[in-house]
Amino acid sequence: MADGSQVARVTHIIAESPVSFEEAIKVGFVRAAKTLRGITGLRVVEQRVSVKDNKIDNYRVKMEVIFVLEG
C-alpha cells in the first residue's frame, strides 16, 4: 500500500434524545467514540420523531459513522 493510503469503514447507528436532533447526534457520537477509534466523520441519514400523547417524545437519528481502519 502506498504511503499515506487509508481504508475507512462505515457503520450505522441509531441514537435518540428527548431534547433535540442535535442532542441525539451528540449522544450517538459519544457512544460510538467509546468503542470505535479513528472516527473521521458522521453522516445523518435519517431523522424521525416518536410521538406520545400528541407530543414529541423522542428525537431519533440514524447515522453513518466513518472511521479509519488501523494497521
Image: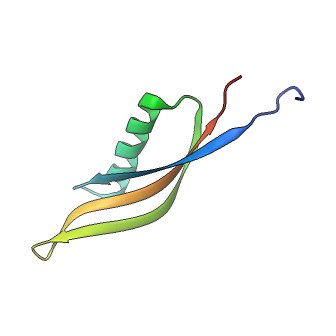
The quarter of the rendered structure image containing the N terminus is top right
Residue lying furthest right? 2
Q: Is residue 60 above or below residue 64?
A: below
The residue at the point 82 percent across, 32 percent down is 5
The residue at the point 29 percent across, 58 percent down is 20
Say left or right for 19 vs 34.
left
Say left or right for 33 vs 4.
left
Residue lying furthest top? 71
Q: Is residue 38 above or below residue 60?
A: above
The colour scheme used here is rainbow
Please state the total of marks drawn on the protein image.
Answer: 0
Residue lying furthest bottom? 54
**In the image, residue 10 lies at what x, y percent?**
60, 46
Q: Is residue 60 above or below residue 56?
A: above
The residue at the point 9 percent across, 73 percent down is 53
The quarter of the rendered structure image containing the C terminus is top right
Say left or right for 54 vs 10.
left
Q: Is residue 49 above or below residue 4?
A: below
Residue lying furthest left? 53
The residue at the point 45 percent across, 30 percent down is 35
- The quadrant in which residue 37 appears is top right
**In the image, residue 65 lies at what x, y percent?**
54, 46
**In the image, residue 36 lies at what x, y percent?**
51, 32
**In the image, residue 17 lies at what x, y percent?**
27, 53
